[in-house]
Amino acid sequence: MEHRILARYPIGNPRRRWKQDHFILSNFSAKGSDMRKAIRHCAEVGFNLLELGWAKPAQAEEAVALCEQLGVDLIYQNMYRYGGMQHHRFYRKNELKELIREKRAWKRIAGYYIWDEPLLDDQLAEARMLTDQCQEEAPDLLPFTVAIPSYNTEYTWDNGEFPAYLERFITTIDPPQLSLDYYPVGMPEHNAEVQFDRSRMWCDLGLMKKLGEQYDMPIWFYYQGQNLHKVELFTFPMIRAMMYAGVLYGAKGLQHYTACGSIIDSEGNKDIFFAEQKAIHREFRELGPTLMALTCRRVIHDESVDPGCAAFKELHNTAEESAWLSGALPARVSVAEYEDAYGNSYMLVLNRDYTVQKTVELPLKKAVRIYEVSKEDGLQYITAENTDVLRVTLDAGDAVLLRLQDAAEAPFTAEYRLVK
């Protein structure tokens, strides 16, 4: 059988110099009371980019040296010298360019944390100014800013306020990539009975996908990696479902909130989900080259998803619009359909139910050959020949990435190699 090596290229906002060449597995806060232990454990669990949310300058300096030693990239932050965090300015003087020059010898600094959740117009304008300064001084480094989420702002989905804010965030700052968070476990619309069915996460992700396509920038998604809202039960399948929810919408980066909670404790020791997170990071490292080569064309949910925002239907597709499906989806199953630059078709099938394993059977419009993209080695393996029913068994909150090919065509496997 023919094996095709297909070229893929770095992606990014064409109006910005920074480009992304690999799938990002990041976090919000790589710190603990023992910084050395925390950074080492963040590297061991498989993050390929460390963030320094709320890190003090001394912690940031220690993190830079440790990341250099361990060969791990980080986004540098010094709240006392530039930028801001959640509506607050911390810098004493605006000297980002000077700081970049000071840090030029540190090769593992992959970017600078510009602003966390700028909200007001003057904060957005400052984030734009600092983003431009970073590009001027270090065009290959990422000037990173994350937007404020819909549940944590005076802007809501009512009357289109949140969509208007997010578009203003994009048009004002023009960031290299769009990053947003949503932490659904423990929100008012979440409980054991409805799980994620009512979550506004689906509205926010749909809006991110739409705006990312409109303004030609990759999207990254912060998922809830710890028991942020202190619910009675918080499990790793919940985390896994949220990670795949981001990928469902075409996210090219998954950002854990936060490393110091469930993976690493406040002292930097390994926490309860360390092993599970390490395993799923390993899977995403194998899936990453393929995911980076794909464009999400449509996202389809079953009828149980009802997040209550008026724009939901406008931001999603129905099963009738699918290129492959011939019927409605089973309960708590979601599907994304992707294409690569060569016209090859892919599908991600997600079991949104984070409590039970599920065997899914999806009737198809025509006979196909199905390949699974392996989480073990990233290669493609034929799992079905000449079938009009897609069958997969998925653990709670898990997903599978498949390539679908017309059964009448000659079979071939594919893998993607980066070309810079």
Image: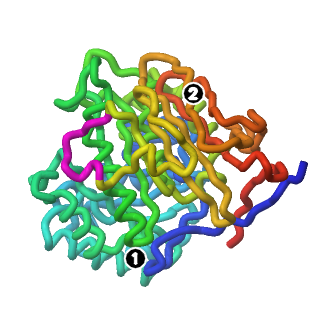
Identify which amino acid the numbered label 1 is placed on.
Cys
One can see residue 300 in this view: yes
Q: Where is residue 368 in the image (x, y as percent from the top left)?
A: 71, 43
Image quadrant assignment for residue 200: top left
Q: Which mark is drawn over residue 361? A: 2
Please say whether residue 25 is one of the residues in the magenta stretch.
no
Position of residue 286 relative to residue 41, above or below, is: below
Tag 2: amino acid: Glu
Secondary structure category for the residue under label 2 = strand
Which residue ends up furthest to the bottom in the rendered image? Answer: 136
Which residue is found at the position 49% from the left and 78% from the top? 17
Question: Where is 362 relative to 126, above or below?
Answer: above
Front residue of 84/150: it is 150
Q: Tell me the magenta residue range.
A: 305-313
Badge nearest the viewer, 2 or 1: 2
- Determine the residue positioned at 56% across, 21% down: 359
Residue at 39% across, 34% down: 302
Q: What residue is shown at x 55% (from left), y 65% (from top)?
A: 20
Residue 182, compared with residue 261, is above or below; it is below
N-term-proximal mark, 2 vs 1: 1
Front-most of residues 31 and 280: 280
Helix, strand or loop under label 1: helix
Q: Would residue 303 appear left or right of 65 to someone viewing this image? A: left
